[in-house]
DNA sequence: GTCTATAGCTGGATAGAC
DNA sequence: GTCTATCCAGCTATAGAC
């Protein structure tokens, strides 16, 4: 097979580029105006095209949200899968949690789309959803491999870490008042989990980071 | 002064009753359809009147939200101000936290209006807001009087308790998966606050977050 | 593929008769 | 105070010329 571009390749390439440009413009808009404020008119204007042209690339407004969701889920999976260097449960889990909190707080609209499901009639397609599922499952395994195995402790952890995110974005946007509590939160969770399991077996010595 | 109703009294009374009926209908609607889905057409239909009649009692849609907010804030203050019987910090704080979580989860639309501020152009008036301020201040005092004085610990507590609420309403609506963790959460917070006094000591060999 | 033009709907809010 | 009738703005989505 030739590696020169074929006619269909550039057509596909141009199509993808146009779709990407629209989605990029959509992210700018939702970051500025809020996730729910996205309108096709504003989007077209921002992208330098007209409303009907959007329909040449997306079949509906929700399919634009779905493309954004897919991007966000992939970014989430990539971010969380990057290797973590650290020794011991606290360092590794704290780095992981901090990564999660910073991913969420660095783009509140993305967080809202991905985790809060507040867009009226929108449900992501399974294909867009898949990367997020994978990342959450591997987080669960990371917790398990460092001593958080009890379901109650897992639920406590998710509540606390997402609570930090919510307080941060709603009460100190752009600041770090709650982000700065990630380390202490992980210490507290680990101490609590260990206090309830006095006969606790240490995790494997290898630094596990991803792909579990 | 006579205690028989004067003409202006019934007028006022009828007016208040009509306003209350509209607000009651509004709560039914937002509980069914979501806070953002409230429309004056639906509201009028539900209340058995027509849209312009609403404007005889409220000057705008946001003033209806404000009346709802005032009701919710008063309910919140009353709920949290009820006496707590219990011995020791854990019992008292846990009862208080449970009361908060149950107040929030028992009516998600009310929780959303009161604490999440997700209605587009709406800001509550200071008069509607006041009861909520009072209740939150007294919660802070309750924490302080039972050993949670450090700002970091207060922030951890709010993050954890609101995190329980958020997980409960979004991942197990109507259930008690996270409500059932209130007791354990308070125990964990108290143990942490006691273990870390007087000064927070960083855990061994950890990259400090950028917090203060 | 991109445009102009517009359909069709829903929203908040108002005018004016009664 | 309550209604009928309506305005005006915004939205998603489509028709049809080019």
Image: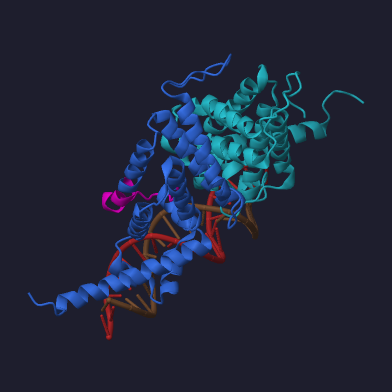
Chain colours: A cyan, B blue, C red, D brown
Q: Position of residue B92 (x, y in %)?
A: 42, 46
In the displayed structure image, the side of residue C14 where residue A79 appears, left or right: right
> Where is A120 relative to A206, above or below?
below
Q: As drawn, which residue projects farthest toward the right?
A: A1
State the residue in front, B210 or A119: B210
Residue at the image position 29 percent from the left and 62 percent from the top: B59
Give the residues in magenta.
B116-133
Q: As drawn, which residue projects farthest toward the front?
A: B87
State the residue in front, B8 or A15: B8
Res. A102 in view: no
Q: Position of residue A161 (x, y in %)?
A: 56, 35
> Where is B107 relative to A31, above or below?
below
Residue at the image position 44 percent from the left and 63 percent from the top: B39
Residue A94 in the magenta stretch? The answer is no
Q: Position of residue B71 (x, y in %)?
A: 35, 59
Classify residue C12 by image quadrant. Answer: bottom left
In the displayed structure image, the side of residue B130 where residue A184 appears, left or right: right
Res. A140 in view: yes
Quarter of the image with the C terminus of chain A in it: top right
Residue at the image position 37 percent from the left and 50 percent from the top: B122
State the residue in front, B6 or A16: B6
Q: Position of residue B166 (x, y in %)?
A: 53, 46
In the displayed structure image, the side of residue B83 where residue A150 appears, left or right: right
Q: How many discs mark residues in the rendered view?
A: 0
């Amino acid at each position: 097979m030739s590696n020169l571009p074929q006619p269909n390749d550039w057509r596909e390439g141009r199509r993808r580029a146009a779709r990407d440009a629209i989605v990029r413009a959509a992210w700018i808009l939702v970051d500025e105006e809020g996730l729910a404020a996205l309108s096709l008119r504003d989007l077209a204007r921002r992208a330098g095209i007209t409303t009907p042209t959007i329909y040449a690339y997306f079949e509906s407004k929700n399919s634009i949200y779905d493309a954004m969701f897919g991007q966000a889920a992939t970014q989430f999976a990539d971010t969380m899968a990057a290797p973590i260097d650290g020794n011991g449960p606290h360092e590794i889990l704290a780095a992981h949690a901090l990564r999660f909190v910073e991913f969420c707080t660095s783009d509140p609209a993305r967080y809202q789309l991905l985790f809060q499901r507040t867009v009226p009639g929108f449900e992501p397609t399974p294909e867009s959803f898949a990367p997020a599922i994978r990342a959450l499952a591997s987080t669960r395994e990371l917790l398990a491999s460092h001593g958080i195995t009890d379901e109650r402790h897992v639920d406590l952890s998710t509540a606390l870490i997402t609570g930090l995110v919510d307080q941060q974005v709603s009460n100190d946007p752009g600041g770090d008042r709650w982000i700065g509590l990630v380390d202490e939160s992980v210490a507290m969770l680990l101490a609590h989990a260990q206090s309830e399991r006095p006969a606790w077996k240490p995790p494997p010595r290898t630094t596990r980071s991803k792909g579990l």
